[in-house]
Image (cartoon, rainbow, N blue to C red):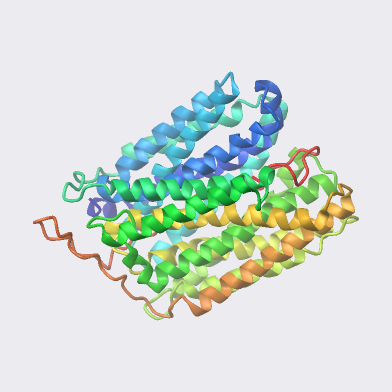
């Protein structure tokens, strides 16, 4: 299933990069159009948040299932199917006439992305062996990811203001078509689906339900609060389902997530690191956007354009990680060497962001700290994916990919909600720029602390040398010997798109949707 990909690495990289670009673009382009969508379709104020939340719910809840499906049925099949679903739902969203139609279309986009995102990066890392070539390929993928997120913010503002809000959905169609053409024309078809293992239905139900309830409980804290009975009950149910999932996986012959993967310090450390880094990164994007609009008084289009320097610096960081550090990734030097300085540099940039002032400006309070943060994040993006791939067998690429995507998605979701609560507590009922500035600054300082903790994880947890992940035992129910792990062709978990900063309209305050 995987050997054919090794012969066409260039085609695989092009297809994975274009697919990731559309996911990154879509996660940021919709947020800017929310006020226009509310007016056009007649959304109730509280219902509007589901345009964002339902995507996070279906995407995060189905990632583990999508990742494991890649291992059983092939990366190429899942990528083509996921892109097709994503494109059809984008068309349905652009033609929506009622709120429920748009929400259903966004749910379908999340379903397609949950299948295609693990497949794209899993296929990419299968085609490139461990070492400098893989880090360089992941650097290209990360740079395209960053460009998609930044262009999404700017394109969303321009399309909404000068064309029509529907084009924030329809703009996905030509990009999806290009990605599908690259996959079908340049990526070799995989082998037949693996018939020796049956899908873990119980694990899929428990994982999807547990992660889905966790995301649902967190994203509703903007209106219900963390201590409300509904939030507590939802999070308790999520914890119970996830505990049942862990128990079921420990006894399953063909688990959705083999718990032995977590015995690898590379896999466990990379997932903890990306959870912390995503929590700080996503929240930082959000609060800097709020600062520019609600404190500095910048418009939505201007705010989107103002984040282009961040995108440029992030690309610069990935170039450094791929061209300089990748040349030193050998048997004795691992991606860990880039993660520590990258996380610390991102922490320094966020600490500078925390010095924002209600009387500041773009040049003094935004440009410099965002540039430093962008370089730091760029140094982390590709190496953390490379760290998560170290020692993982290619036949478990989708499994590890789904786990990594889930960690990142949950880190961003939980971190954003928690830091929004911290900012609201600091701000209180006041809505003047000085009070809002104080809340944003506190949350940015906490975000810097999360990046410091991520650096500590990289130092303490990630090993200095490569080591293989403990192999999966042969399933007891099958008479066919299990395929041995191939250390030379490990796989990197797919990373969902980095969401760019949502442009928040001036009338929205912290009690609005943190998305």
On-image quarter of the C terminus = top right
Residue 120 in percent (x, y) is at 39, 48
Of 198 and 457, nearer the camera is 198
How far from the left and from the top, in percent, is residue 284? Answer: 68, 56
* Place of residue 54 in the rendered image (x, y in percent of width and height, measured from the top left): 54, 38
Picture coordinates of residue 502, whole percent (x, y): 67, 44
Left or right of 1? Residue 312 is right
Q: Residue furthest front?
A: 229
Front residue of this view, candidates 429 and 108: 429
Horizontal arrangement in the rendering, residue 357 relative to residue 398 (left or right): right
Side of 228 relative to 104 (left or right): right
Residue 221 vs 418, above or below: the answer is: above
**Seen in the image, is 247 located left or right of residue 27?**
left
Question: Is residue 495 at least partly visible in the picture?
Answer: no
Residue at 47%, 43% in the rendered image? 59
Please tell me whether residue 11 is drawn above or below residue 327 in the rendered image.
above
Q: Is residue 41 above or below residue 484?
A: above
Quadrant for residue 130, please give it.
bottom left
Q: Residue at x 50, y 66 (%)?
A: 272
Q: Residue at x 59, y 38 (%)?
A: 52
**Number of callouts:** 0
Above or below, 280 relative to 17: below
Q: Does the image show residue 22?
A: yes
Quarter where residue 352 is shown: bottom right
Instruction: Pick out the residue farthest to the top.
Output: 97
Closer to the camera, 191 or 427?
427
Identify the residue at image location x=36%, y=50%: 67
Q: In the figure, residue 471 lies in which quadrant?
A: bottom left
């Amino acid at each position: 299933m995987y050997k054919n990909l090794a012969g066409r690495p260039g085609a695989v990289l092009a297809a994975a990069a274009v697919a990731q670009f559309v996911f990154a673009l879509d996660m940021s382009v919709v947020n800017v159009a929310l006020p226009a969508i509310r007016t056009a379709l007649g959304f109730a104020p509280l219902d509007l948040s589901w345009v964002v939340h339902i995507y996070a719910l279906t995407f995060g809840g189905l990632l583990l299932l999508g990742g494991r499906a890649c291992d059983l049925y092939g990366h190429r099949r899942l990528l083509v199917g996921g892109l097709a679903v994503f494109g059809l739902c984008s068309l349905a969203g652009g033609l929506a006439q009622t709120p429920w139609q748009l929400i259903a279309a966004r749910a379908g986009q999340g379903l397609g992305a949950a299948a295609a995102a693990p497949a794209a990066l899993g296929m990419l890392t299968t085609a490139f062996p461990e070492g400098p070539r893989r880090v360089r390929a992941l650097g290209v993928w990360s740079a395209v990811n960053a460009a998609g997120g930044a262009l999404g913010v700017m394109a969303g503002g321009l399309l909404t203001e000068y064309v029509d809000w529907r084009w924030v959905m329809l703009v996905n169609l030509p990009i999806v078509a290009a990605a599908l053409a690259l996959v079908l024309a340049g990526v070799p078809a995989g082998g037949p689906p693996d018939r020796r293992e049956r899908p873990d239905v119980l694990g899929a139900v428990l994982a999807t339900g547990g992660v889905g309830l966790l995301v649902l409980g967190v994203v509703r804290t903007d209106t219900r609060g963390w201590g409300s009975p509904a939030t507590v009950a939802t999070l308790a149910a999520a914890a119970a389902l996830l505990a049942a999932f862990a128990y079921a996986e420990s006894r399953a012959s063909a688990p959705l997530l083999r718990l032995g993967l977590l015995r690898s310090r590379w896999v466990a450390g990379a997932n903890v690191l990306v959870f912390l880094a995503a929590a700080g990164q996503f929240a930082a994007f959000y609060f800097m956007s709020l600062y520019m609009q609600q404190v500095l008084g910048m418009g939505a289009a201007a705010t989107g354009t103002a984040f282009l320097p961040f995108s440029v610096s992030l690309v610069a960081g990935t170039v450094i990680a791929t061209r300089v550090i990748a040349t030193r990734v050998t048997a004795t030097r691992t991606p860990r060497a880039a993660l520590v300085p990258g996380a610390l540099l991102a922490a320094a940039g966020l600490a500078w962001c925390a010095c924002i002032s209600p009387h500041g400006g773009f040049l003094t309070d935004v440009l410099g700290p965002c540039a430093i943060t962008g370089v730091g994040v760029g140094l982390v993006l590709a190496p953390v994916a490379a760290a998560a791939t170290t020692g993982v067998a290619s036949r478990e690429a989708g499994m590890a990919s789904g786990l990594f995507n889930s960690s990142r998605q949950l880190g961003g979701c939980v971190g954003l909600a928690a830091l929004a609560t911290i900012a609201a507590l600091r701000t209180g009922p006041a809505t003047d720029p000085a009070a809002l500035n104080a809340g944003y600054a506190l949350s940015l300082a906490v975000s810097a602390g999360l990046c410091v903790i991520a650096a500590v994880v990289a130092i303490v947890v990630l090993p200095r040398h490569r080591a293989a992940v403990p192999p999966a035992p042969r399933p007891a129910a099958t008479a066919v010997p299990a395929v041995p792990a191939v250390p030379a062709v490990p796989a990197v978990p797919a990373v969902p798109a980095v969401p760019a900063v949502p442009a928040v309209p001036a009338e929205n305050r912290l009690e609005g949707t943190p998305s």
